[in-house]
Image (tube, rainbow, N blue to C red):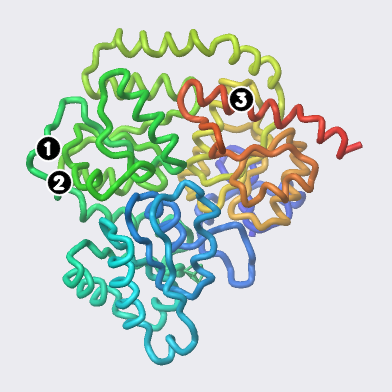
Amino acid sequence: MLYNTEENCNKNILIENRDTSKAKRQHDIDTSSCCKYTQPGNSTERLCTFHGCRVVIGNQIKNVVHLVHSPIGCAYYSWDYRSQSYGYGFTTGIQERDIIFDSEEKLYDAILKASEEFNPDAIFVYETCIPGLIGNDLQGITKKASEEIEIPVIYFDCAGFKGATQNEGHKIANRQLFEIIGNGKEEFHSTPYDVNVIGGGSSVKEAKIIENMLSKIGIRVLCSFTDNATIDKIRVMDRAKINIVHCTKSSMYLAKMMYKEYGIPYIKGNFFGIENCSMSLRNIGKALNIDKDKIENFIAENLERIKEKLELYRENLKGKRVFISHGAQRVLNYIDPLKNDLNMDIAGVATYFGNEKNYKEILKKIPKETVVLDNPNSYELERAIVESNADVVISDNHIRYLVHKLGVPFVYGRGGKKSYIGFDGFINFADEVHGAINSKIWKLLNN
Ligand code: SF4
C-alpha cells in the first residue's frame, strides 16, 4: 500500500513495500498506516520482537548469560550484528522431538549448566516463537531455577510474533530490567550530579565517551543503560538525579517508569552532531544546576579544537546527497547534523519500525521531494537509493554489500573502529563520510 504524509504536503512520499516511481505520484499520505505487521510472504528488512529485546537491549549487559530458548535459527542474527556484546550467548537448540515431547526440562538443565560453567551475575532467558506457540511455562521454570542457583534468572516473554516490530521487544526488556532497579547496596554514596544515560544503542566505546565527556563537567554516570551496564549498575539507577534519554525509541518506557516509581525526571540528550551535543550539554547543565559558564567554556574549548577540520569537511561535503537507512530514532538524530553541521542534502530516508509520530517528525526535517520508505525490502531499498542519486548511504551493516553492488559509497552509521559520538567523534564521522565519497574505487567501478 502507499501512503502520503502531512496534510498540506503533496510531495513527501511514504511508501510501504511499494514501487517508488508510483509513489511519487500519490498525494494523500496517511502516516497512521505505518508500523503495522508485515504481511506474511513479504520479505523486508524489519526485525522481530525477540531481536528488539535481546539484541538491542539485553545483549550489552556484562557478565550475564543470554540463553535463547529457540531453534538454532533465532540465535543466528545476534553476535555478528552488534559486535560489542559482552555477555555469553547460547541457544537451547529446540528440535522437533522437543516440540513434541516437551523442552522445559532441556531449558532447566541449560540454566543450571550455564550457571555452573560461567558463574554469571544473572541469566536472561528469552522466549521465541516456538516456545511461545507451544506454551512452555518459562515463568515457572526460571523461578524454580533461580531458587536453585541463587542468582536472578530473568524471563523475557519476547516471542517474535508478540509485536509488529522490534519495538515491542524494547518495551518487554525495559519492563523486566526495571524490576532489578532499586536493589542496590545501602552503603552507596550519591552525589547531586549523578545521572543515568539510557538508550545509547551502539557500543561500550560510545558509552565511555559520553561518561568521560560528562565527567569533565562534574557529572557522574551511574549506569549507561545498557551499553556499559552490569547488573550492579542497573541496581543503583534509582539513585540518579536525572535520566538522560539518548534513544527514545528503545528506552523512553524505562525513563517513564522510573519517573513514576522513583520521581526521577528525564530529559532527552543527543550527543551526535555539534549542535546536538552542545545543546544537550546545556540542557543537562541546566537540569542539574551546574554553573552556566562551566558548560559554555567546555563547549567553546571543544569547538575551538575541532574548528579547522569541521570547516574543511563542511566545504567539501556541501550539497552532497545522503540517503539514511536506520531505525527511526537514529534517522531523526542524524538528519540535523548532516544538514546543519555538514551542509549535506538529504536524498532519501528508510526506517524499519518508525511509528506515525516518528514519520511526522522526519517529514518536517527534510525537503518535500525526498523519498521516505517505511519497512522496505531489499528491492525497494535498492531502487530508492538509485532513484535518489545519493552520493553516500549511511546505514547498518546488513545492507553494506547491497549498496556496494550499486556502486554507491557506504558508511556504517554506528561507527566501527572509531566512534561518532561527541565533538571529536563527529569529526571521525565527517572524515568517514568524506573518505567514502571521495574514494577512487567508485570512479573506477562506475567507468
Ligand atoms: S523469535 Fe520468531 S520471528 Fe524472531 S527469529 Fe525466532 S522464529 Fe523468527
Q: Quadrant of the N terminus?
A: bottom right
What is the secondary structure assignment of the residue under circle 3?
helix
Q: Is residue 268 above or below residue 313?
A: below
Q: Nearer the viewer, mark 1 or mark 3?
A: 1
Residue 332 in the figure: left or right of residue 151: right
Query: Is residue 28 in sight in this rendering?
Result: no
Residue 367 in the figure: left or right of residue 365: right
- Does label 3 or label 2 sit earlier along the sequence? 2
**Residue that lies at the very extreme toward the bottom in this rendered image:** 101
Q: Which residue is mark 1?
A: 188
Real-space CA distance between mark 1 and mark 3, rounded to the nearest whole angstrom: 41 Å
Real-space CA distance between mark 2 and mark 1, rounded to the nearest whole angstrom: 8 Å
Please state the horizontal and vertical placement of residue 279, each as a whole percent of the image: 40, 21
Real-space CA distance between mark 3 and mark 2, rounded to the nearest whole angstrom: 41 Å
Q: Which dot marks residue 184?
A: 2
Amino acid carrying label 3: it is: Ala
Amino acid carrying label 1: it is: Phe
Residue 403 in the figure: left or right of residue 107: right
How packed mark 1 is, by other alpha carbons closer than 10 Å (few <14, some 14-19, many 20 or more), is few
Front residue (pair 142, 43):
142
Q: Nearer the viewer, mark 3 or mark 2?
A: 2
Say which residue appears at 55% left-offset and 54% top-offset.
80
